[in-house]
């Protein structure tokens, strides 16, 4: 909330008479016009809150009903009462999930100082979020509303939308006070037991376990136990995780006023098993005996399917096959019992490793067909980590070394300095064949040279790219050379096309954007008639908005006749999943260009990460400006003399 709004309300509360804009302006040391604009915005903000700012001709402004507590609660003590809609939705999520009984709508409206109409609008968004977690808001006349659903889903929703978000109500809840105060005790017991049984886990997993137990304690106090497990995995009783879970809960029972049924041991054991998958690079020697034949076959089928769709050649990576098998073994039980495991790295994985995430999505088909279970985004993110590790191993093992020639006008000493700097920075990833003066360049054969590194302008057309650098190599010079080594110039030329770049467009929904971009491709015969449906189906699995105002929708599989990006910038951001989006890059990859996917996705990751670039692109009004901005910012000053 704007600080001036608080000061305006404070001045009016202290005054016995209406105050003119000039009087308020003098007190706030701003112009009268600024005060009038603030009051106009404040009146819009107060709509639906049963609060008003009156104006009297010639006398000024005053607060209607100064005794209304909301004037002080909202304006003089900000943060206690949620103001914006997003804040109210978060408050309502906490209020409903943490409340064990029904609560009346009028009570919620009074707590938020809003009308029933405004509250019903906020509750509509709450219902959407809860439905995404297979939960419903039950309404009983004369009683109010309450969240209903499977206990495991309610607990996950509490974890995901309260404990792992900025909280609006939890710390003020008397009902949860005792359980929250037990956090330190639970943590100490967990650490002691895990050390005793030599089960090291990452910090993220430790926090997940603490949250799981604290929520279980409170829900059991409120009389809500876990539902029946469809088929309790009896063989798990022989696992180390089960005995450790039993000891942990037994010790917690000895210090807190809660008794844990056996089902809680099963669930904690499955959580402990899940902590293994947090470290895809961990030691895995001697673990093959833990994998049964069914899991091994399923993983091989998953990787074959990924290779078939994305042509990544991962089927012979034994380390990947083992890692995925160890991941799936405990995950299957969680899937069967609808037990979600939060992935705190999910958004970062989607933004940094988009190709791996998309490839991981295809595993859903195999898992669904074999076990008739649904996989959520959190698990897909963990699978993506294993795939990304495999792609990195492949990249290191088969990197093609580029050959370059240095052109320098400052003498042999500066040329040698530049050569040594380049060798020091790029090592074996760059083959520097030698140095030459500009006037001797025509004496050199460039047949086997991939690009030149030059400290001076080269005006002749020589048929290969030229990277301009300073003799004293700087960070920007390094980035320019990296642009050549990663083939970013080729990717840009291949995918960015004027025909499919649409700037400053007006749309209201993701579907409208996808249909508009898809139709332009269909009209040119670049995609088939089911293309738009495939993009929308992929979007239904997980929104492709990855933050930074950007979305990269695409079909389930590469099907285009030729590869390109279809780009739209929007006049105003639109809601895409749970994020605002103003730059949309529709990916169209040819089924014959699958080898382009990894470098293309790498380039898009750079774009998604660069906040300044995105804002600059959104201001572009023509294609040339748009292309030049990407070239300058992402690729650096790389030119091509061809």
Image (cartoon, helix red, strand yellow):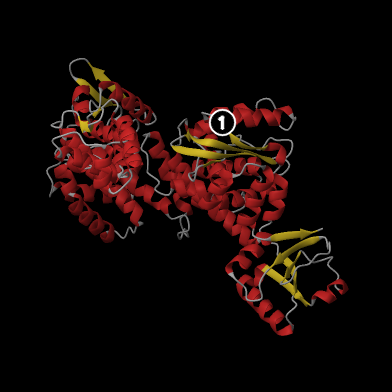
Can you give x and y, in whole percent of width and height, for residue 606 in the image? Answer: 57, 53
Q: Residue furthest top?
A: 141
Residue 194 shows up from this direction: yes
Is the residue 557 above or below the residue 434 in the image? above
Can you give x and y, in whole percent of width and height, for residue 425 in the image? Answer: 61, 72
Quarter of the image for residue 130 reads: top left
Which residue is at 58% across, 31% downward? 513
Is disc 1 surrounded by few (<14), some (14 to 19) or many (20+) residues within 10 Å?
Answer: some
Q: How many marks?
A: 1
Quarter of the image for residue 442 reads: bottom right
Residue 225 shows up from this direction: no
Along the viewing direction, whichever of 1 and 439 lies nearer the viewer: 1
Relative to 543, 104 lies left or right: left
- Quadrant for the N terminus in the image: top left
Can you give x and y, in whole percent of width and height, for residue 257 in the image? Answer: 12, 43
**Disc 1 secondary structure class:** loop
Q: Residue furthest bottom?
A: 413
Which residue is at 63% across, 76% downward? 472
Q: Identify the residue under disc 1.
A: 506
Along the viewing direction, whichever of 640 and 310 lies nearer the viewer: 640
Which residue is at 64% across, 72% downward? 427
Along the viewing direction, whichever of 54 and 172 lies nearer the viewer: 54
Which residue is at 67% across, 27% downward? 519
Relative to 351, 204 lies left or right: left
Can you give x and y, in whole percent of width and height, for residue 351 in the image? Answer: 51, 47
Quarter of the image for residue 118 reads: top left
């Amino acid at each position: 909330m704007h600080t001036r709004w608080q000061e305006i309300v404070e001045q009016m509360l202290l005054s016995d008479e209406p105050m003119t804009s000039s009087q308020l302006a003098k007190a706030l040391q701003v112009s009268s016009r600024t005060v009038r604009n603030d009051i106009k915005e404040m009146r819009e903000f107060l709509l639906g809150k049963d609060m008003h700012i009156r104006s009297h001709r010639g006398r000024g402004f005053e607060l209607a009903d100064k005794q209304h507590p909301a004037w002080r609660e909202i304006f003089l003590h900000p943060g206690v009462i949620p103001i914006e809609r997003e804040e109210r939705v978060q408050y309502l999520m906490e209020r409903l999930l943490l409340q064990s009984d029904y609560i009346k709508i009028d009570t919620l409206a009074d707590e938020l100082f809003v009308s029933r109409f405004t509250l019903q609008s906020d509750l509509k968004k709450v219902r959407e979020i809860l439905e995404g977690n297979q939960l419903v808001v039950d309404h009983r006349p004369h009683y109010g509303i309450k969240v209903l659903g499977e206990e495991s889903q309610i607990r996950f929703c509490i974890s995901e939308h309260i404990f792992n978000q900025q909280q609006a109500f939890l710390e003020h809840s008397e009902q949860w006070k005792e359980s929250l105060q037990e956090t330190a005790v639970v943590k100490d017991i967990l650490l002691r037991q895990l050390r005793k049984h030599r089960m090291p886990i990452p910090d993220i997993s430790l926090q997940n376990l603490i949250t799981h137990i604290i929520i279980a304690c409170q829900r059991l106090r409120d009389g809500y136990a876990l539902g029946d497990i469809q088929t309790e995995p009896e063989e798990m009783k022989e696992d180390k995780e089960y005995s450790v879970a039993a000891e942990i809960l037994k010790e917690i029972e000895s210090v807190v006023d809660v008794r844990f049924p056996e089902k809680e041991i099963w669930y904690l054991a499955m959580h402990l098993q899940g902590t293994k998958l947090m470290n895809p690079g961990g030691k895995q020697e001697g673990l093959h005996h833990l994998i049964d034949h069914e899991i091994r076959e399923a993983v091989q089928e998953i990787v074959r399917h990924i290779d078939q769709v994305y042509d990544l050649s991962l089927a012979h990576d034994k380390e990947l096959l083992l890692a995925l098998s160890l991941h799936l073994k405990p995950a299957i039980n969680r899937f069967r019992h609808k037990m979600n495991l939060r992935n705190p790295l999910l958004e970062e994985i989607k933004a940094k490793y988009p190709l791996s995430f998309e490839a991981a999505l295809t595993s859903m088909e195999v898992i669904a067909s074999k076990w008739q279970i649904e996989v959520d985004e959190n698990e897909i993110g963990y699978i993506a980590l294993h795939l990304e590790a495999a792609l990195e191993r492949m990249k290191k093992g088969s990197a093609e070394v580029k050959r370059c020639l240095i052109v320098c006008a400052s003498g042999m000493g500066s040329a040698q300095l530049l050569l040594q700097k380049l060798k020091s920075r790029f090592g074996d990833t760059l083959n520097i064949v030698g140095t030459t003066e500009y006037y001797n360049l025509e004496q050199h054969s460039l047949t086997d040279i991939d690009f030149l590194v030059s400290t001076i302008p080269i005006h002749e057309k020589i048929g290969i790219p030229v990277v301009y650098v300073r003799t004293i190599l700087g960070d920007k010079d390094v980035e320019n050379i990296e642009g050549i080594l990663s083939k970013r110039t080729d990717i840009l030329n291949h995918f960015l096309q004027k025909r499919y770049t649409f700037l400053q467009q007006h749309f209201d929904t993701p579907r409208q954007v996808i249909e508009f971009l898809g139709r332009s491709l269909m009209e040119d015969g670049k995609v088939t008639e089911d293309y738009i449906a495939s993009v929308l189906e992929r979007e239904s699995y997980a929104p492709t908005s990855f933050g930074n105002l950007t979305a990269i929708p695409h079909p389930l599989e590469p099907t285009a006749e030729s590869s390109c990006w279809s780009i739209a910038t929007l006049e105003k951001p639109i809601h895409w999943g749970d994020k605002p989006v103003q730059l949309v890059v529709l990916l169209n990859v040819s089924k014959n260009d699958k080898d382009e996917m990894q470098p293309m996705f790498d380039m898009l990751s750079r774009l998604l990460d660069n906040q300044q670039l995105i804002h600059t692109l959104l201001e572009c009004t023509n294609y040339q400006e748009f292309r030049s901005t990407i070239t300058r910012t992402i690729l650096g000053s790389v030119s091509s003399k061809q």
